[in-house]
Image (cartoon, rainbow, N blue to C red):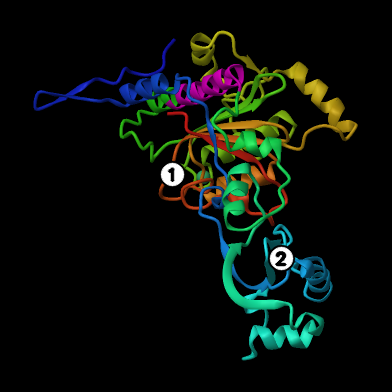
Amino acid sequence: MEIGPPVKKLKHSGSYCETSTDIFDRYIQLIDNKKNLKAVLSDEFDSPLKLVKVFVGHIKDVKNISKTILALNQKIPLKELQHLKRVRRQDVILCPTNFFNDTSSIQDFIECYVPELKHVFEYFKQVEVPLNPPKIDRHFQETKRIWSCNFHPNKYLEKLTGDEFFPPYDLKNHRLFMKVVFEVAKFYSIKYNIDSIDSTFKNINATIVVDPNLQTIVALSFDNRQAHPVQHSAMLAIDNVAKTQDGGVWNSKENNNEYVGVPEDVLPYLKEKFPSLKYYQKEYKNVLEDKIKSKEGPYLCTGYYIYMLREPCVMCSMALVHSRVQRVFFCIGNDECGALKSKTKLQTIASLNHHFEVFTDFL
Ligand SMILES: [Zn+2]
């Protein structure tokens, strides 16, 4: 099929110069490896433990330990430090050092609030203890070295932070879909004669939306930023998903009737490259409409996976939040305005009303 003129390899003073097509082909090969993907998680998983200073009292006589804990728990509960055990050997946590900000000493404080303990302690000291409860075993081990603590392991989180999250079959699929993304980008870069592509892919992006249950491409798109400031590829992809649900605001004459969310021009190219891939068709649409009528169906991208060549910006990432995407996979980081890893991690902001998982490390 015709996909535009082939890009010629240029020679610069005798040295080989990589063309845009070469760059795409090189990346498509690089994506095809066996390494597992990595989840992009909040900073607390990579940063050192956050510590807080507390007053600790050393109990003179071990016989007084239970009585001391009981009195302290009643009168000075450790609210934010509940994950820590109050006592470690003969040392007991009294309160954070910022608990009282007048000039009274810890001895005066104890005498005032827990007078029954005024003769229990041999001495007081200040100690730094972990501020947050451990989320994964590694944090638990680090916390334990500093102070005894409680820990309820979360198997999913443990796996997510490990090196073998995706089983080989899933991994193969994710890598296949990322290759599709690069082929989409390659196709349109040739079609639109974009030859200023370097290995950072700064001026282009491509997105595909996959229904993981049906292993079907629901929608796809190529960046149209040059012509329309808001038509980044993720925005276009979401709009194309909306078209599969009788919505969508942007005209795209190239979207055909059979595959609602997939532009017609790129389809023969993809079918040739990936003969086994399935695309979202009208019959799925009917199933979907029944679900929508019964209010069980998806809202835009509910349950869908998004694969992007380049890390999305804040606008696109927020649109992905609003469209209820389940997972976002991207290949190339975006140091200038990437909102899922490079500049910020939108998916880790607790106050947002929807959260998706983010995976990268394809290369
Ligand atoms: Zn964007």
Quadrant the C terminus occupies: top left
What residue is disc 2 on?
Answer: 80
User: Crowdedness of circle 1 by 10 Å Cα count: few (<14), some, many (20+)?
Assistant: many
The answer to whether residue 170 is magenta is yes
User: Crowdedness of circle 2 by 10 Å Cα count: few (<14), some, many (20+)?
Assistant: few
Up the image or down, 271 lies above or below 238; here it is: above
Left/right placement of residue 205 relative to residue 245 reads left
Amino acid on which disc 1 is placed? Asn
Residues at badges 1 and 2 in contact (C-beta under 8 Å)?
Answer: no
Q: Residue furthest right?
A: 294
The answer to whether residue 93 is magenta is no
Disc 1 and disc 2: Cα gap in Å? 37 Å
Q: Between 148 and 200, which is closer to the camera in this rendering?
A: 148
Q: Between 198 and 351, which is closer to the camera in this rendering?
A: 351
| Point 51% across, 54% down: residue | 48
How many numbered callouts?
A: 2
What residue is disc 1 on?
Answer: 334
Indicate which disc residue 242 carries. Answer: none
Q: Main secondary structure of the magenta part?
A: helix
Q: Give the structural element (helix, strand or loop) at label 1.
A: loop
Residue 160 drawn at (x, y percent): 61, 36
Say whether disc 1 or disc 2 marks the residue closer to the N-terminus: 2
Q: Between 187 and 116, which is closer to the camera in this rendering?
A: 116
Residue 240 drawn at (x, y percent): 63, 32
Q: Between 347 and 189, which is closer to the camera in this rendering?
A: 347
Give the foreground label among 1 and 2.
Answer: 2
Amino acid on which disc 2 is placed? Glu
The stretch of residues the image draws in magenta is 167-185
Q: Give the structural element (helix, strand or loop) at label 2.
A: helix
Q: Quadrant location of residue 66?
A: bottom right
| Mark 2 residue CB less than 8 A from any atom of ligand 1 | no
